[in-house]
Image (spheres, helix red, strand yellow):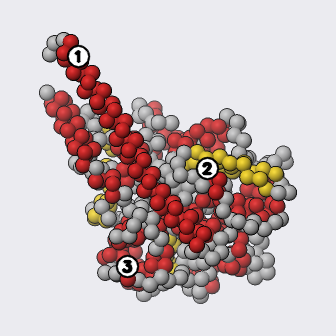
Amino acid sequence: MKMNRRVFIKACGVMAGYAVLGANLTKEAVASTMDFVGLRQTSVYTADAKIYKVRKSQDNPMIKKIYDHEHGFLHEGPCGHMSHHLLHTHYNDRSARLAALKNKGFKFNL
Amino acid sequence: MKLIEGVMYQTNAPKGIDPDEIFFVQVDATKCEACGSCEEVCASGAIQAINDEGTRQVVDPAACMNCGQCLVSCPYGAIYEGVSYVDEIFEKLKDPDTVVVSMPAPAVRYGLGECFGAATGTYVGGQMHAALRKLGFDYIWDNEFTADVTIMEEGTELIQRVQEQGKKDARPLPQFTSCCPGWVKFAETFYPDLLPNLSSCKSPIGMLGPLSKTYGAHETKTEPKKVYTVSIMPCIAKKYEGLRPELADSGFRDIDATINTRELAYMIKTAGINFNSLPSQQPDPILGDSTGAATIFGNSGGVMEAALRLAYEVLSGKKLANPDIKVVRTHEGINTADVKVPNFGTVKVAVASGLANAAKLCDEVRAGKSPYHFIEIMTCPGGCVNGGGQPLDPDVRASLFKSTVAQINRRFRARKVSA
């Protein structure tokens, strides 16, 4: 097809339309998702303020029981010996597999 | 494959498999309309076009953080979950020799009701516990209890790190939270040099698993080897976390099965339980009682606020009269705050959700320019309440206009390629 003035202007119009439409759709989609999330978030803070009688972890009676200095299962307190055995962990460097993929020509965002 | 609350699932219960080999989310190429919604929301770029038509796929599990944001954003239901334990859990619930323990996350109780017709975000904690009891779980324990334990451990670790600065072998600041499995894998994959900054604390579910098979088993006089722990999450990445080989500190697998909110709704429906007529019930004590600080773990900024409710009292030696620390509550993006603590000084904190935002904070730490003491990161925008395992946003699939545009685009591309 020959690119004359009329075709060029038409193409510009279509492209501009697509750009505006695309941007608006994305913006709308993000905004509606955050509304949806916002409703759930509000419900969480309402429950924290109105449904839960105790609002600080250190005031939970069962927390006091498990960390009790004499009879508690974690009697050495937070970050004690038993805590380190059961409740703490270590992490692994997983960058090698990603580097191998990048070497194969895959592109990622980071 | 099984259809569960609008999402397809492969029903299998992987055992002894390296989770790095599993596609926890993948695109069904026959259903993909090449609209690109999934690629837009993927921070790592693991989901890409695999042909000229624009069909998307997760190219390799190593680049996927298993968050499932692609799945919840797909207007066509073309993305499926690769792992589901529902069949195995039904079998275990019937087995009289197995003591099945429920471990639901905070955010589950703010999403589950939606599967039974409730308005978005309705709190159904009491009915959830009743439903779990009806399903036949032997102990109704709750992941919110270990959210409180996490605060005790992680808050203490933060205070230790602050106090040891300047000394030999001091652990570095800022301390990052480690509750979110998508974020943990992200740090391991893209920022391994920052791993010393991650709190060594397991996530709440990583703590409740081993506590169930040690402390919980002891307190209820149960043989630990009979205990079968079911983690119920708003999340897909938790399925990866449950399979981590290092999570076996109780002497057994700490977490035996992981399902998400949608799968729990499916189980309740399959068992013929009338959810909406259930009375509100409490969890079983010992590993069940929780606080407001635990329930806010479901929101972006929640772990931070809960930790500050502890740190304030420990550092200042005073009672915190009003537990609301609203400055750290985060809806989207990055939120930073200076929290003044009497007798101590200022605690500088940052909260981010979404891995693109996390990357900005990580780059700052890497460059040595991060002024913060404590940084909370959640993979899903807004936090766990918006997790990849939560009930779907009805608006995502209802946009007829968007789907029509994508279908036209796909046909257009297909014709161009064949011509």
Circle 3 is placed at which residue position?
A: B276
> In the rendered image, which quarter is residue B6 located in?
bottom left
Left-right relation of B211 to B172: left
Chain where mark 2 sits: B
Disc 2 with disc 3 on a shared chain: yes
Q: Earlier in the sequence, mark 2 or mark 3?
A: 3
Task: Say what amino acid the circle numbered 1 marks.
Answer: Phe
Quadrant the N terminus of chain B occupies: bottom left
Pointer 3 local density, CA inside 10 Å: few below 14, some 14–19, many at least 20: few
Chain where mark 1 sits: A
> Does B383 sit above or below residue B266?
above
Residue positioned 23% across, 16% down in the render: A8
Q: Residues under labels 2 and 3: Cα distance?
A: 36 Å
Quadrant the C terminus of chain B occupies: top left
Chain where mark 3 sits: B
> Does B16 sit above or below residue B125?
above
Q: Residues under labels 3 and 1: Cα distance?
A: 60 Å
* Secondary structure under the numbered disc 3 in the rendered image: helix
Q: Is residue A80 visible?
A: no
> Does B370 sit above or below residue B212?
above
> In the rendered image, which quarter is residue B166 located in?
top right
Task: Say what amino acid the circle numbered 3 marks.
Answer: Asn
* Secondary structure under the numbered disc 2 in the rendered image: strand
Please state which of residues A9 and B27 is positioned toward the viewer in this rendering: A9
Pointer 1 local density, CA inside 10 Å: few below 14, some 14–19, many at least 20: few
Please state which of residues A109 and B85 is positioned toward the viewer in this rendering: A109
Circle 2 is placed at which residue position?
A: B351
Residue positioned 56% across, 40% down in the render: B359
